[in-house]
Amino acid sequence: MIKLTGNVSRKVPIPGKEFSSQSFSAGMEAEVGNEATQEEIKAKIREMYDILEAAVKSQITLNGVHLPEEKESEPTQAAVNNNGGNGNDSITPSQKNLLEKLVREQEIFGKERIELLAIKSKSKAASAIKELIENNRKGGGNGAK
């Protein structure tokens, strides 16, 4: 048997306290057979990561902590196309599902994955989705790992 070990942790600021943070983490182990293919191992690792990421997000939410919004950068075409919306409308369920699907399919891990899955605004989600689809078309399907 091949033993896989995974850990996900996240530090978030403590509201109202400068230079302070609190940590949330989750870990797990899983086994795959010795005959497992590389694709089966990758799939198991992705599954573990998704489970651990959901567990950490749940811990954060249960403790009443809100993840900080992403810093605003230069307006993207998707934000410009929002046509009068303030860009702060909440991400739609279909955008959230598509983002999760693209992140999973393109095997994006680490900080980039966390940032993409933490997007809360509709315009930022539209911009990120557009960029991920363009990356995939250009053959840059594997994000930062």
Image: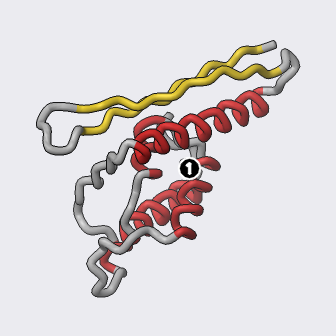
Q: Position of residue 10 (x, y in %)?
A: 39, 33
Quarter of the picture containing the N terminus is top right
Circle 1 packing at 10 Å, graded few (<14), some (14-19), many (20+), is many
> Residue 70, percent across and down?
29, 53
User: Compared with residue 91, is residue 65 higher up or lower down, i.e. above or below?
Assistant: above
- Report the residue at 71% width, 15% height from top: 3
Q: Please name the residue shown 59% across and 42% down the image.
A: 107
Furthest residue toward left: 18
Q: Which residue is label 1 attached to?
A: 103
x then y, percent, for residue 101: 62, 55
Determine whether, in the image, residue 98 is placed left or right of residue 124: right
Residue closer to the observer: 74 or 95: 95
Q: Is residue 18 above or below residue 36?
A: below
User: Who's the residue at 53% across and 58% down the image?
Assistant: 99
Q: Nearer the viewer, residue 65 or 36?
A: 65
In the figure, 54 relative to 133: above or below?
above
Say whether residue 86 is left or right of residue 123: left
| Number of numbered discs on residues | 1
Q: Which three-letter amino acid code belongs to the residue tagged 1?
A: Val
Q: Residue furthest right?
A: 35
Position in image of residue 75 (x %, y %): 26, 68
- The image quadrant that residue 55 belongs to is top right
Q: How is the image coloured?
A: secondary structure
